[in-house]
Image (cartoon, grey):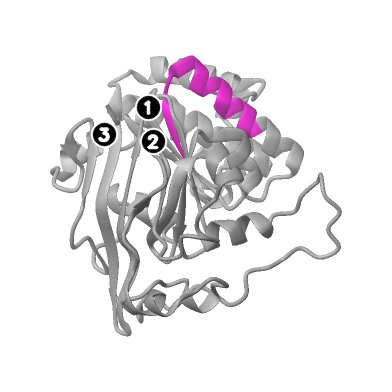
Amino acid sequence: MAILEIKNLQAHFHTRKGIVKAVNGISYSLEPGQTLGIVGESGSGKSVSQLSYLRLLPSPPLRIPQGQVLYRGQDLLTLPEDKLRAIRGHKISMIFQEPMTSLNPYLTIGSQLIEPLMIHLGQSKKVAWKEACDALTRVGIGEADKAMKSYPHEFSGGMRQRVMIAMALTTRPEVLIADEPTTALDVTVQAQILELLKKLQKETGMAILLITHDLGVIAGMADKVVVMYAGRVFEEGPVETLFEKSAHPYTKALLKSTPRMDQLQEQIPVIGGTIPDLSQLSSGCPFYDRCSYKKDICQETFPLERKLSSSHHTFCHVEEL
């Protein structure tokens, strides 16, 4: 049974220029202990889809006209704020995209780490402090007691990212949403962070929803992949299948634009054009103008789901690529 199931979720921003359909009817599920990777260009709706159902975006301008987000059978979209707050940050935790700005510069690391433990687990300050020190040690930060008394500006980007991971994991969540957890980190630190997430997942059995642009990270971390574009899911399947037998032109284009260490590439292919204006979407496929395989029908209607196997499906009118 899925621990988190998203059904036909829409998230729209009502602006003076019109309705921006940032998320336009997406569906996928996450199993316990599984790592689900979500990939796509900036503006595809990857982060907004998560932030919207966790109510971490201002409303207005955000509106969720339809959809369900089921956590263990409970629809998070209909829960009262107090009940959602008991789940958010406790059973569902999130590592935010920017470690440089996600920590409060006016508060010590310790005061920020013990807060969720005191709120969600009801621990005393003394017990929470010890638990937070243990969490920092687990994520590879030495002299934890000294680190707890430090301020964010005293830490490097990699160390701050470790603090964010520790904070997200102190309440022992069942679902961890990792939004670009290795952004702006050098490759050595990136590898350490990813290995740390794998280790902690193995120890706790949590499910990870990994949002990233980096297909190399997906190849090494994910069990299943969802490819998003212009607020929609374009393809979904096991990681090996998407890398070896991708069925959507957009997925193929993403893979081709990724540098390869095993091939001599004088020039890396790029995807021409940009993501369309999400406030001016037509009824057709939003990838139409950038697609090398387009047909007339692609401009007229968005394709229905096409199942390629029990675990692999795509949304594309073109059957032979």
Q: Residue 93, which numbered label?
A: 2
Disc 2 + disc 1, Cβ < 8 Å: yes
As shown in the figure, which amino acid type bears the numbered disc 1?
Answer: Pro
Q: 88 above or below 148?
A: below
Q: Quadrant of the C terminus?
A: bottom right
Disc 1 + disc 3, Cβ < 8 Å: no
Q: CA distance from mark 3 to mark 2?
A: 9 Å
In the picture provided, is 202 more to the left or to the right than 28?
Answer: right
- Residue highlighted by disc 3: 87
Q: 91 above or below 56?
A: above
Locate residue 247, reporting x and y percent: 51, 54
Residue closest to the eye, 279 or 145: 279
Q: First in sequence, mark 3 or 2: give its number.
A: 3
Q: CA distance from mark 1 to mark 3?
A: 9 Å
Q: First in sequence, mark 2 or 1: give its number.
A: 2
Locate residue 236, reporting x and y percent: 43, 47
Q: 157 above or below 90?
A: below
Asked which secondary structure carries label 3, the reply is helix
Q: Which residues are magenta?
A: 193-209
Question: Pointer 1: residues within 10 angstroms few (<14), some, or many (20+)?
Answer: many
Q: Residue 160, which numbered label?
A: none
- Residue highlighted by disc 1: 173
Q: Is residue 267 magenta?
A: no
Q: Residue at x 35, y 81 (%)?
A: 280
Residue 5, quarter of the rendered image = top left
Question: Pointer 2: residues within 10 angstroms few (<14), some, or many (20+)?
Answer: many
Asked which secondary structure carries label 1, the reply is loop
Residue closest to the eye, 274 or 136: 274
In the picture provided, is 238 more to the left or to the right than 82?
Answer: right
